[in-house]
Amino acid sequence: MSEALPMTALPRGTLLSVAERTCRLEALGPSLRALTADQRDPIAVMATFAACVWHALPQCSWAGFYRRVERSLLRVGPYQGGLGCLEIPFERGVCGACARSRLPQRVDDVHARADHIACDSATRSELVLPVWGEGGTLRAVLDLDSPHLAGFDDAEAALLASLLADAFAAARWDAADWSPT
Ligand code: SME
Protein backbone atom coordinates (compact mmCIF):
# COMPACT_ATOMS: atom_id res chain seq x y z
CA MET A 1 0.00 0.00 0.00
CA SER A 2 2.68 2.55 0.96
CA GLU A 3 4.43 1.77 -2.36
CA ALA A 4 1.33 3.07 -4.12
CA LEU A 5 1.53 6.47 -2.44
CA PRO A 6 3.44 9.04 -4.47
CA MET A 7 5.92 10.12 -1.79
CA THR A 8 9.04 9.00 0.02
CA ALA A 9 8.68 7.23 3.37
CA LEU A 10 10.46 9.24 6.07
CA PRO A 11 11.50 8.43 9.65
CA ARG A 12 8.67 8.93 12.16
CA GLY A 13 9.06 12.27 13.92
CA THR A 14 10.55 14.14 10.95
CA LEU A 15 9.23 17.72 10.90
CA LEU A 16 9.16 18.80 7.25
CA SER A 17 8.65 22.42 6.20
CA VAL A 18 5.07 23.60 5.70
CA ALA A 19 5.73 23.72 1.93
CA GLU A 20 6.88 20.09 1.91
CA ARG A 21 3.93 18.98 4.04
CA THR A 22 1.37 20.72 1.84
CA CYS A 23 3.08 19.29 -1.23
CA ARG A 24 2.79 15.76 0.21
CA LEU A 25 -0.89 16.30 1.10
CA GLU A 26 -1.60 17.62 -2.39
CA ALA A 27 0.15 14.58 -3.88
CA LEU A 28 -2.02 12.34 -1.69
CA GLY A 29 -5.26 13.69 -3.18
CA PRO A 30 -5.56 11.56 -6.35
CA SER A 31 -4.58 8.30 -4.55
CA LEU A 32 -6.92 8.95 -1.67
CA ARG A 33 -9.80 9.86 -3.97
CA ALA A 34 -9.21 6.71 -6.05
CA LEU A 35 -9.01 4.52 -2.94
CA THR A 36 -12.20 5.89 -1.36
CA ALA A 37 -14.32 6.57 -4.46
CA ASP A 38 -17.84 5.15 -3.98
CA GLN A 39 -16.88 3.67 -0.59
CA ARG A 40 -19.99 3.76 1.58
CA ASP A 41 -18.52 2.26 4.74
CA PRO A 42 -17.15 5.14 6.86
CA ILE A 43 -14.90 2.80 8.89
CA ALA A 44 -13.16 1.69 5.68
CA VAL A 45 -12.69 5.33 4.68
CA MET A 46 -11.40 6.28 8.15
CA ALA A 47 -8.86 3.43 8.17
CA THR A 48 -7.61 4.32 4.69
CA PHE A 49 -7.47 8.05 5.44
CA ALA A 50 -5.57 7.52 8.72
CA ALA A 51 -2.99 5.29 6.99
CA CYS A 52 -2.50 7.79 4.15
CA VAL A 53 -2.09 10.81 6.46
CA TRP A 54 0.25 8.84 8.74
CA HIS A 55 2.44 8.15 5.71
CA ALA A 56 2.26 11.70 4.32
CA LEU A 57 2.88 13.59 7.58
CA PRO A 58 5.75 12.01 9.54
CA GLN A 59 5.54 14.68 12.26
CA CYS A 60 2.42 12.87 13.54
CA SER A 61 2.68 10.61 16.58
CA TRP A 62 -1.04 9.81 16.30
CA ALA A 63 -3.41 10.15 13.36
CA GLY A 64 -6.95 8.93 13.44
CA PHE A 65 -10.61 9.38 14.15
CA TYR A 66 -13.02 9.74 17.02
CA ARG A 67 -16.55 8.79 15.94
CA ARG A 68 -19.68 10.46 17.26
CA VAL A 69 -21.54 7.54 18.81
CA GLU A 70 -24.06 9.53 20.87
CA ARG A 71 -25.31 13.09 20.74
CA SER A 72 -22.37 14.28 22.89
CA LEU A 73 -19.91 11.38 22.98
CA LEU A 74 -16.92 10.47 20.81
CA ARG A 75 -15.45 6.97 20.65
CA VAL A 76 -12.13 6.03 19.07
CA GLY A 77 -12.15 4.82 15.48
CA PRO A 78 -9.39 3.69 13.11
CA TYR A 79 -6.00 5.24 13.87
CA GLN A 80 -2.23 4.93 13.55
CA GLY A 81 0.17 5.56 16.43
CA GLY A 82 0.20 4.84 20.16
CA LEU A 83 -2.84 3.97 22.21
CA GLY A 84 -5.55 6.63 22.24
CA CYS A 85 -8.30 7.22 24.84
CA LEU A 86 -11.34 5.11 24.09
CA GLU A 87 -14.02 7.71 24.71
CA ILE A 88 -14.10 11.51 24.84
CA PRO A 89 -17.25 13.34 25.99
CA PHE A 90 -17.95 16.54 24.03
CA GLU A 91 -17.13 18.61 27.13
CA ARG A 92 -13.55 17.29 27.35
CA GLY A 93 -10.33 17.75 25.44
CA VAL A 94 -9.44 19.39 22.18
CA CYS A 95 -11.41 16.75 20.28
CA GLY A 96 -14.43 17.63 22.44
CA ALA A 97 -13.92 21.33 21.69
CA CYS A 98 -13.96 20.60 17.97
CA ALA A 99 -17.09 18.46 18.32
CA ARG A 100 -18.86 21.13 20.44
CA SER A 101 -17.94 24.10 18.30
CA ARG A 102 -17.89 22.25 14.96
CA LEU A 103 -14.74 24.27 14.26
CA PRO A 104 -11.18 23.13 13.52
CA GLN A 105 -8.88 23.29 16.54
CA ARG A 106 -5.18 23.96 15.95
CA VAL A 107 -3.22 23.88 19.19
CA ASP A 108 0.45 24.84 18.83
CA ASP A 109 1.30 24.07 22.48
CA VAL A 110 -0.99 21.66 24.29
CA HIS A 111 0.57 22.64 27.64
CA ALA A 112 -1.11 26.02 27.22
CA ARG A 113 -4.53 24.32 26.84
CA ALA A 114 -6.02 23.34 30.19
CA ASP A 115 -8.57 21.05 28.53
CA HIS A 116 -6.07 18.97 26.55
CA ILE A 117 -6.33 15.22 27.31
CA ALA A 118 -2.80 13.83 27.62
CA CYS A 119 -3.09 10.34 26.12
CA ASP A 120 0.63 10.61 25.32
CA SER A 121 2.79 12.86 27.53
CA ALA A 122 5.11 13.49 24.56
CA THR A 123 2.36 15.28 22.59
CA ARG A 124 3.11 18.99 22.17
CA SER A 125 0.71 20.10 19.43
CA GLU A 126 -2.40 18.89 17.72
CA LEU A 127 -4.90 19.53 14.98
CA VAL A 128 -8.53 18.40 15.15
CA LEU A 129 -10.97 18.78 12.25
CA PRO A 130 -14.70 18.04 12.02
CA VAL A 131 -15.92 15.26 9.72
CA TRP A 132 -19.32 15.90 8.19
CA GLY A 133 -21.95 13.35 7.18
CA GLU A 134 -25.16 13.62 5.19
CA GLY A 135 -27.15 16.77 5.85
CA GLY A 136 -24.21 18.54 7.47
CA THR A 137 -24.31 16.37 10.60
CA LEU A 138 -21.10 16.10 12.64
CA ARG A 139 -20.19 12.39 12.49
CA ALA A 140 -16.55 12.25 13.65
CA VAL A 141 -13.40 14.27 14.19
CA LEU A 142 -9.96 13.76 12.68
CA ASP A 143 -7.31 14.05 15.39
CA LEU A 144 -3.61 14.55 14.58
CA ASP A 145 -1.01 14.78 17.35
CA SER A 146 2.69 15.67 17.15
CA PRO A 147 5.60 15.70 19.60
CA HIS A 148 6.72 18.97 17.95
CA LEU A 149 5.57 22.40 19.09
CA ALA A 150 3.44 23.94 16.32
CA GLY A 151 3.54 20.70 14.38
CA PHE A 152 0.60 21.74 12.20
CA ASP A 153 -0.24 24.73 10.04
CA ASP A 154 -3.44 26.35 8.75
CA ALA A 155 -2.53 25.49 5.14
CA GLU A 156 -2.29 21.85 6.17
CA ALA A 157 -5.64 22.09 7.97
CA ALA A 158 -7.33 23.52 4.85
CA LEU A 159 -5.93 20.76 2.64
CA LEU A 160 -6.93 18.06 5.13
CA ALA A 161 -10.48 19.47 5.29
CA SER A 162 -10.71 19.25 1.52
CA LEU A 163 -9.31 15.68 1.49
CA LEU A 164 -11.83 14.70 4.19
CA ALA A 165 -14.76 16.08 2.18
CA ASP A 166 -13.67 14.11 -0.92
CA ALA A 167 -12.86 10.88 0.94
CA PHE A 168 -16.19 10.77 2.83
CA ALA A 169 -18.35 11.98 -0.08
CA ALA A 170 -19.94 8.54 -0.61
CA ALA A 171 -19.96 7.45 3.05
CA ARG A 172 -23.32 6.42 4.51
CA TRP A 173 -23.11 6.81 8.25
CA ASP A 174 -26.48 5.34 9.17
CA ALA A 175 -27.19 2.76 6.50
CA ALA A 176 -25.30 -0.49 7.00
CA ASP A 177 -24.85 -2.59 3.86
CA TRP A 178 -25.98 -5.69 5.78
CA SER A 179 -28.75 -6.49 8.20
CA PRO A 180 -28.47 -8.94 11.10
CA THR A 181 -30.72 -11.97 10.87
N1 SME B 1 -5.47 14.90 22.27
C1 SME B 1 -6.85 14.63 22.36
C2 SME B 1 -7.11 13.32 23.00
C3 SME B 1 -7.00 12.17 22.09
S1 SME B 1 -5.53 11.50 21.99
O1 SME B 1 -4.45 12.34 22.24
C4 SME B 1 -5.30 10.39 20.86
C5 SME B 1 -7.67 15.72 23.03
O2 SME B 1 -7.23 16.46 23.89
O3 SME B 1 -8.82 15.80 22.67
Image (tube, grey):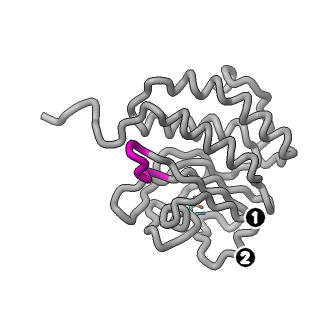
Report x, y in % for residue 161: 61, 44
Kindly identify the residue that appears in the image at 49 percent across and 62 percent down. Answer: 99
The residue singled out by tag 1 in the image is: 108
Within 10 Å of the Cα at label 2, are there few (<14), some (14-19), or many (20+) other Cα atoms? few
Q: Residue furthest front?
A: 135
Q: Residue furthest bottom?
A: 114
**Ligand 1 within 8 angstroms of badge 2 C-beta:** no
Of helix, strand and loop, which one carries label 1? Answer: loop
Quarter where residue 128 is shown: bottom right
Q: Is residue 56 left or right of residue 79?
A: right
Q: Which residues are magenta?
A: 133-140
Q: Looking at the image, do the residues carrying marks 2 and 1 touch, with CB atoms under 8 Å apart?
A: yes
Q: Amino acid at mark 2?
A: Ala
Of helix, strand and loop, which one carries label 2? Answer: helix
Report x, y in % for residue 145: 67, 56
Determine whether 129 is above or below 108 in the image: above
Q: Amino acid at mark 1?
A: Asp
Q: Is residue 144 left or right of residue 7?
A: left
Quarter where residue 175 is shown: top left
- For the image, the number of numbered tags is 2
* Magenta-colored stretch includes residue 75: no
In three-dimensional space, the C-alpha distance between marks 2 and 1, rounded to whole angstroms, equals: 9 Å
Between 110 and 164, the one lying in front of the other is 164
Numbered badge on residue 78: none
Report x, y in % for residue 81: 62, 49
The residue singled out by tag 2 in the image is: 112
Between 38 and 87, the one lying in front of the other is 38
Which quadrant does the N terminus fall into? top right
Between 96 and 75, the one lying in front of the other is 96
